[in-house]
Amino acid sequence: MKQTPLVMPKMSMTMTEGVMVTWHKAEGDEIRAGDVVCEVTTDKVDMEVEATVEGTLARIVAQPEDVVAVGEPIAYVATTSDDLLEGLFDPVEPPIDEAAVAATPVPAEPEPVPAARPAVIAAVPAARRVAAERGIDLATVTPTGPAGTIRLSDLGPTETRPAIKPENKPEAKPALKPRRGPRAVIARRMSPSADVPQFVVYRDLDLVPSSQSWTAVFVRAFAQALRRHPELNGEWADGQLRQHEHIGVALAVDTERGLLAPVLKDPDLDDLGTLGERIADVVRRARAGKLTLAEMSGGTTTVSNLGMFGVDAFQALLSPPQATALSLGAVGHKVVPVPGGIGVALRCTAGLTVDHRVGDGADAARLLATLQQILSV
């Protein structure tokens, strides 16, 4: 019975590999074309893989958390369909002329010629050193090593010395734990960030108390600020700045399987209540692994909020080709200087990371100033 490979499909333009998540079929199960056989992660999204042929799932190759390149087999399906073209393009061996073979004379084997001893005697360095110390002529030693090489043991027994007992125990080797699944995808996607000349500018933002989610407040205000600074809503490509007409805020979401960044399209066009519902829905589905590829694409910037962990400030790395990333610390009341004394203000420290090829420090400072103006309303 013929076995047809079921390969890792290419599900997006940028996909080069996928991570196996789970199998819905087991070896020996009957499958039909269109049946969902497994789920894979690509570009941080869980996607279903359908069978392309009908038959029996004969052998599973890719196990959960295995990384498989696009086009490589993840399983084999035993099919009963005949391949009418099978063997059509196999190379044809030319016919053998038995008479010509019989008439071909067989050359006689040459007499073996004893190998001459090389002028330079081959010996391992340790053998040369010991031979020099003991006054042994290497030409008188019978070699037992490969290609006539003299080994140290060919020189005869050597003086043995008691082994020195180490005072300290050898250092334990660190345990190696390979990154798999979404964390492996993150590692590969974020490595190019090290090649981007990036810097970060921090600013304490004064806030007005709100009944809405702070994440929604910041995402909406940041998108509005980018509308006023379109040069920072772009990317560096082919030696020039490419500006985006839309704003796609990739929101960093912490999940059990790693960091995901679903994209909120034009969040500045929503009111805070609607945006808060969108964010709650996308976070819930991200943690359940129910995002679509469309929801993971189109990001022009990233917002990462670690305030819920008590973090005051941090630097967010750029996610190429994005040119900006906004980091947000904890929101809280802080003691601040006021005319004539001190006071208490509701504040949050924000960090704006910028691709230096797209903007400089003054551009980043102006964007943060605009963000402050919007948040003060």
Image (cartoon, helix red, strand yellow):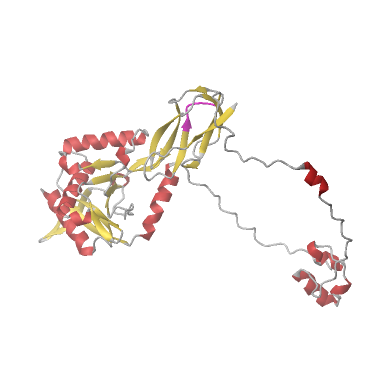
Q: Residue 360 in the image: x percent, y percent?
A: 24, 63
Q: Quadrant of residue 142?
A: bottom right
Span shown in magenta? 22-26
Q: Residue 273 in the image: x percent, y percent?
A: 17, 36
User: What residue is shown at x 13% (from left), y 50% (from top)?
Assistant: 374
Q: Is residue 290 left or right of residue 53?
A: left
Vertical arrangement, residue 314 with respect to residue 56, above or below = below
Q: Residue 228 in the image: x percent, y percent?
A: 14, 53
Q: Residue 1 versus residue 185: which sits nearer the camera? A: 1
- Tell me, yes or no, if residue 211 can be seen here: no
* Magenta-span inclusion, residue 24: yes
Q: What secondary structure is the stretch in magenta mostly built from?
A: loop
Q: Is residue 44 left or right of residue 302?
A: right
User: What residue is shown at x 19% (from left), y 44% (from top)?
Assistant: 220
Q: Is residue 26 left or right of residue 299?
A: right
User: What residue is shown at x 22% (from left), y 34% (from top)?
Assistant: 277
